[in-house]
Image (cartoon, rainbow, N blue to C red):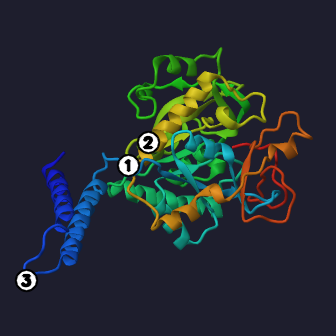
Amino acid sequence: MGASSTMATAIVIAACLFVARAGAVRPPPGAADGGEQRRSIVELVQRARGAQRAKAAADPTVYQHTEPIIGVLTQPCSDCPGKSYIAASYVHWIESAGGRVAPIRFYASDAELKRLFNSVNGLVFAGGLTWLWLDSPYVATARKLFNWAVEANDAGNPFPIHGTCLGHQLLHILVSNVSRNDLLVETDAVEHPSVLDFTPAAKDSRTFGGMDADLLAKLADPTLNIAMENHEYGIPPAHYKRWPILGEWFDILTTTKDRQGLEYISTVEAKKYPFTGTQWHPEKPVSEHGMDTIPHTLDAVRVGQWFANRFVDTARYSSNGPASHEQELADLIYSTPPVFSARFETLAEDNYDGPYMTYYFDHKDKPPSGPDDDEHEGGGDPDPSRRA
């Protein structure tokens, strides 16, 4: 503890003792009464505590929150009972590490986006079906949040971002400003539990550093296949040479091969910022039960928990926070009941691959069904079989 922190603590203790004794001391004639004395001491205590909080807020090595709030960017939703949605598995994943969730609607106004950003301690770009066109409202909103996160970290306020699957691709698009049609290649990796092939950078990374050796070995074991891949597109390592800014921004920690042997990047972390991306799904083993191919072994769950713990713990150091307790309660996702979306799909599908449970926002008058997306080139219905 530093000298200034020790001094502030001493002031608080001394002031509290003085307040306790003040009621028993009669002030001399002409002096302020006991009530005024107590009020002045209370103000002194409040100032000292305020100084302590300010010092802690300026220190990125001190927890600012033990129950951080994570913003999850909603995605477009056309054929479902809402204007946008969040798969509940991302909420469960964050909660498993002690975090809470606030939805960030991709169509919110700039003022509302900025208010929400200042209220949350981290951000998740989830997997899903959204087309990542550079000029789409979804990507435009993600870019604003991403830029604010960079500014916060540059100012000494830790603010983590994690992107899963589509979110992993989104991080690369935001950094490179390259069209998805150029950056992404087709992969044969839908419903493909697989392995992670570690690069030399993984050993000393923030992401995998400290992970139990047995779990690292199991992630690379082709007889176990505990990393859940479920995507039609990926980013090959060669694209880091084609667009050098990607290599300047990210370290490639793992790659994976699809069923045809095509290698793609499966895990990255930013060199300078607490940003991570996984083409695979650490959240699915715990709470997605529609697909038969999702691994639900203890080791698969352990991996997901490791990633949740690392991400949410970083968010505890963020000094962001809601303006009031009332605003905090209003922002949280828990006023919105989740829908058992798989119930309405598995009647027709033996191997439903959408969210098991879903949060829908700004509901439309439609029967419940799985999320879909109409934000794509040329209009019409998107291909429901497509995965990021």
Q: How many marks?
A: 3
Q: For marks 3 and 2, give the CA distance.
A: 56 Å
Q: Is residue 270 left or right of residue 257?
A: left
Q: Percent from the top left, x then y, of residue 234?
A: 64, 39
Task: Look at label 1 and name its amino acid.
Answer: Tyr
Point 60% across, 59% down: residue: 139
Hey, which quadrant is residue 22 in on the image? bottom left
Q: Foreground residue, 251 or 16?
A: 16
Q: Percent from the top left, x then y, of residue 199?
A: 47, 26
Dot 2 surroundings within 10 Å: few (below 14), some, or many (20 or more)?
A: many
Point 31% across, 47% down: residue: 62
Say whether disc 3 or disc 2 marks the residue closer to the N-terminus.
3
Classify the position of the C terminus by image quarter.
top right
Q: For marks 2 and 1, give the CA distance.
A: 7 Å
Label 2 residue SS = helix
Task: Look at label 3 and name its amino acid.
Answer: Pro
Q: Is residue 123 left or right of residue 154?
A: right
Q: Is residue 196 above or below residue 367?
A: above
Task: Look at label 2 and name its amino acid.
Answer: Asp
- Decide if residue 186 is in sight here: no
> What residue is pinned by disc 2?
313
> What residue is pinned by disc 1?
317
Say whether disc 3 or disc 1 marks the residue closer to the N-terminus.
3
The circle drawn on residue 29 is 3
Hey, which quadrant is residue 108 in on the image? bottom right
Q: For marks 3 and 1, give the CA distance.
A: 51 Å
**Most extreme residue toward the top, as rendered?**
223
Label 1 residue SS = loop
Classify the position of the N terminus by image quarter.
top left
Q: Is residue 237 above or below residue 12?
A: above
